[in-house]
C-alpha cells in the first residue's frame, strides 16, 4: 500500500476512534471532576466557552476525531523505508504529543497553568506510547521471523 493510501485509510480509522475515545475519556474525567451525580460529555469550561452543551460536544467530537486521524494517519511514516525506525518513532511521537496538548488546551481539559495535570498526562501518554510501540515492534519482529522461516523452508524444499 502506498504512503498516501496508508495515510487515508489510517486517518479515516483514526478519526472514528478519536471521536469514540475522546468522548469516553472526557465523559469519565469531566464527570469525576465535577462529581455532582450528573454525566458530563464535555468539560464545563468548554460548554461555557462555546455557549451550548450540544455545540461543545460537536466541537470536541470533531477535534478528537481530527486528533485521532492525525495520530493514526501519522503512523504512515513507519512505511517510509528510507527512514530509520528511530526517525519514524521520534517524528510520530512528537506529532502525537504536540497534537494531544493542542487538543487538551483547546478543549479546556486543563489549562497551561495546571502543571500537575500536564506532567501526569505527559507520563501517561509517554508510557502508553512506549507500550503500543513495543507491542507493534514485537509483532512485526515475530511476523518477519515467521516469513524468514517459511523462506528457509522453501529453499530447503528445492
Image (spheres, rainbow, N blue to C red):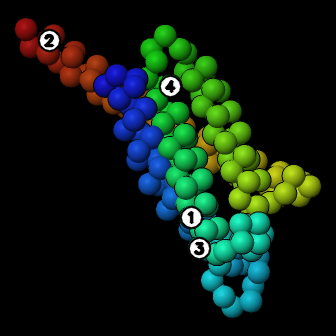
State which mark lies toward you, 1 or 4.
1
Foreground disc of the pair 3, 2: 3
Q: In which quarter of the image is the N terminus?
A: top left
Name the residue carrying label 3: 54
User: How many other residues sit within 10 Å of disc 3, few (<14), some (14-19) or many (≥20)?
Assistant: few
Task: Tell which circle, 1 or 2, labels the residue nearer the N-terminal end.
Answer: 1
The residue singled out by tag 2 in the image is: 156
Q: What residue does disc 4 label?
A: 77
Q: Which of marks 4 and 3 is nearer the N terminus?
A: 3
Structural distance between the alpha carbons of marks 1 and 2:
60 Å
Q: In this view, does 80 lie to the left or right of 133?
A: left
Q: How far apart are marks 4 and 3 (CA)?
A: 36 Å
Q: Are marks 4 and 3 in contact (CB under 8 Å)?
A: no
Under circle 3, the secondary element is helix
Residue at the image position 45 percent from the left and 40 percent from the top: 11
Residue 138 appears in the picture as rendered:
no
Mark 2 neighbour class, 10 Å CA radius: few under 14, some 14 to 19, many 20 or more:
few
Judged by depth in the image, the label closer to the viewer, 4 or 2, is 4
Q: In this view, does 34 lie above or below 87?
A: below
Q: Position of residue 88 (x, y in %)?
A: 57, 23
SS at mark 1?
Answer: helix
Lower position in the chain sequence, tag 3 or tag 2: 3
Per the image, the residue denoted by label 1 is: 58
Mark 1 and 3 residues: CB-CB less than 8 Å, in contact?
A: yes
Where's residue 27, x and y in %?
A: 62, 73
Label 2, secondary structure: give it.
Answer: helix
Amino acid at each position: 500500500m502506498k504512503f498516501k493510501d496508508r495515510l487515508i485509510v489510517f486517518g479515516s480509522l483514526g478519526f472514528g476512534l478519536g471521536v469514540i475515545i475522546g468522548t469516553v475519556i472526557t465523559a469519565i474525567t469531566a464527570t469525576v471532576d465535577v462529581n455532582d451525580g450528573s454525566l458530563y460529555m464535555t468539560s464545563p469550561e468548554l460548554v461555557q466557552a462555546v455557549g451550548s452543551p450540544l455545540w461543545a460536544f460537536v466541537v470536541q467530537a470533531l477535534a478528537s476525531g481530527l486528533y485521532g486521524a492525525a495520530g493514526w494517519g501519522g503512523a504512515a511514516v513507519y512505511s517510509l523505508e528510507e527512514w530509520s525506525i528511530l526517525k519514524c518513532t521520534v517524528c510520530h511521537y512528537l506529532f502525537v504529543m504536540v497534537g494531544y496538548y493542542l487538543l487538551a488546551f483547546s478543549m479546556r481539559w486543563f489549562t497551561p497553568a495546571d502543571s500537575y495535570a500536564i506532567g501526569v498526562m505527559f507520563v501517561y501518554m509517554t508510557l502508553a506510547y512506549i507500550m503500543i510501540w513495543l507491542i507493534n515492534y514485537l509483532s512485526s519482529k515475530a511476523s518477519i521471523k515467521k516469513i524468514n522461516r517459511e523462506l528457509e523452508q522453501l529453499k530447503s524444499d528445492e
